[in-house]
Image: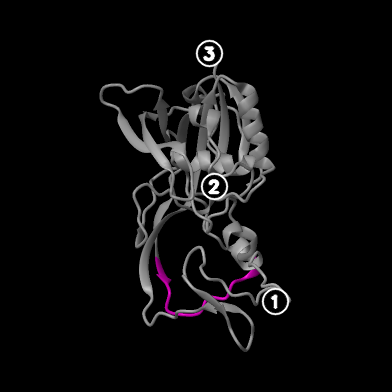
Amino acid sequence: MSDSHALLIRLAGPLQSWGLTGRFTRRDTHSRPTKSGVIGLCAAALGRDREEPLGELSEVLFGVRADRPGTPLRDYHTVGGGTYPLRPRDLLTDHQRADKATLQPVPEGTEPTPFGRSELAAWYGSPKYVTADPSSGALVSGEVRRHALITERWYLADAAFLVGLEHPDRTLLEQIAHALEHPKRLLWLGRKACPPTGDIALGVVAGTLREAFESHALLPEIPSYDGDPPAPVADARPWAWIESPRPLPGIGSLSDQPVRFGTDGGVYGLRWETRHRITIASHARGWDIIL
């Protein structure tokens, strides 16, 4: 009997995006969740700062089973070419914007300006310069571009993945599971525009990742409602990608092993994985989860 344990994680939502090589004008998505993206999700749930060492989080073995691979979706996206009011939700979801908007130094002998009317010398993201509109007080772009910058962004629509994190320390995995259901920070599936739906942490089980994938049924289909087409039937033998602790001849590699995260984009190394066609056991455990 293996001493390993596996935390099972459900990643499902209307949209997901797991970038590997994208740059600003073209943001790609991998065909499945990346290890760096999932470890970042766990770190956010635990409330860790970006500059904080990953510790045991970087030591877990990673695997993903594609229960519903989803459909690639291209988004026509523009940046610039207009005004940019700074909404309250921007301040709630982006601490850097909030700091710049609310923690401006007040000159001695003057009263602080009302919330929402402060001027920013710089803004995290576009636009680069922000000023207050003289009539409404809303924060808008101080440098309006004549032409918008067009970007191409890719997503996976209606996908559902069963992710596994394998580690001998069951307590560590249980701490991550609790944090995913009681996160200290907002969670998303690769990008802020992609919130997860339903239950995320599905429990810790004994055994390896492959054993966990073979002994658990496919994730439930999204329920259909009156007038909606039925959800597509998932492949009865889904593909799974399981991390190998060492390089082996003939196996693939990905540059998504997180070394550290940071505001500069972080550092990532190579990891190795094998691809398997999973045959789910006839006595596989079902699910009692919120979709």
Tell me the quarter of the image containing the N terminus: top right
Q: Name the residue furthest front.
A: 108
Residue 67 makes an appearance in the image: no
Q: Magenta region: which residues? A: 76-88
Q: Is residue 8 above or below residue 149?
A: above
| Circle 3 residue | 2
N-terminal of the pair, mark 2 or mark 3, is 3
Q: Name the residue furthest top.
A: 1
* Residue 123 place in picture, x, y as percent: 52, 67
N-terminal of the pair, mark 1 or mark 2, is 2
| Circle 1 residue | 113
Q: Secondary structure at mark 2?
A: strand
N-terminal of the pair, mark 3 or mark 1, is 3
Nearer mark to the viewer, of 3 and 1: 1
Q: Is residue 223 above or below residue 114?
A: above
| Circle 2 residue | 12
